[in-house]
Image: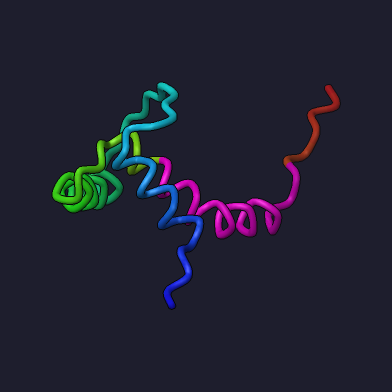
């Protein structure tokens, strides 16, 4: 029996058109190329760009959290 992951469940919600929130972003270079390829793949499965962002956040947030945690806090400007 196949266990449905959180990512798969959210993808199914996106197909069903549930839960929305507006977001505006600008992409350039490699990020734009990757986005366009992902957007085409998602469209073939009936997932709108907004849903694709949700899937990326759900899947990628752990890696981003780890990268952010490894950074030092910026130096405070004491002037």
Residue sticking out furthest to the front: 1
> Which residue sits at x=41%, y=21%?
22
With 77 as the anchor, is 9 left or right in this view? Answer: left
* Residue 11: % across, % down: 37, 49
**Magenta residues, as a range?**
54-73
Q: Quadrant of the N terminus?
A: bottom left
> Which residue sits at x=32%, y=33%?
17
* Residue 31: % across, % down: 30, 47
User: In the rendered structure, does residue 1 fall within the stretch colored magenta?
Assistant: no
Against 19, is 75 above or below? below
* Residue 19: % across, % down: 44, 29
Q: Quadrant of the C terminus?
A: top right
Q: Depth check: 23 or 78 in front?
A: 23
- Per the picture, the main secondary structure of the magenta-coloured stretch is helix
Q: Quadrant of residue 20?
A: top left
With 1 as the anchor, is 52 left or right in this view? Answer: left
């Amino acid at each position: 029996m196949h266990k449905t992951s959180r990512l798969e469940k959210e993808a199914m919600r996106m197909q069903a058109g549930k839960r929305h929130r507006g977001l505006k972003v600008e992409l350039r270079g490699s990020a734009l190329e990757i986005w366009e390829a992902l957007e085409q793949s998602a469209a073939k499965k009936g997932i709108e760009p907004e849903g694709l962002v949700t899937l990326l956040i759900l899947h990628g947030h752990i890696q981003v959290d780890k990268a952010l945690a490894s950074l030092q806090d910026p130096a405070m400007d004491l002037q």
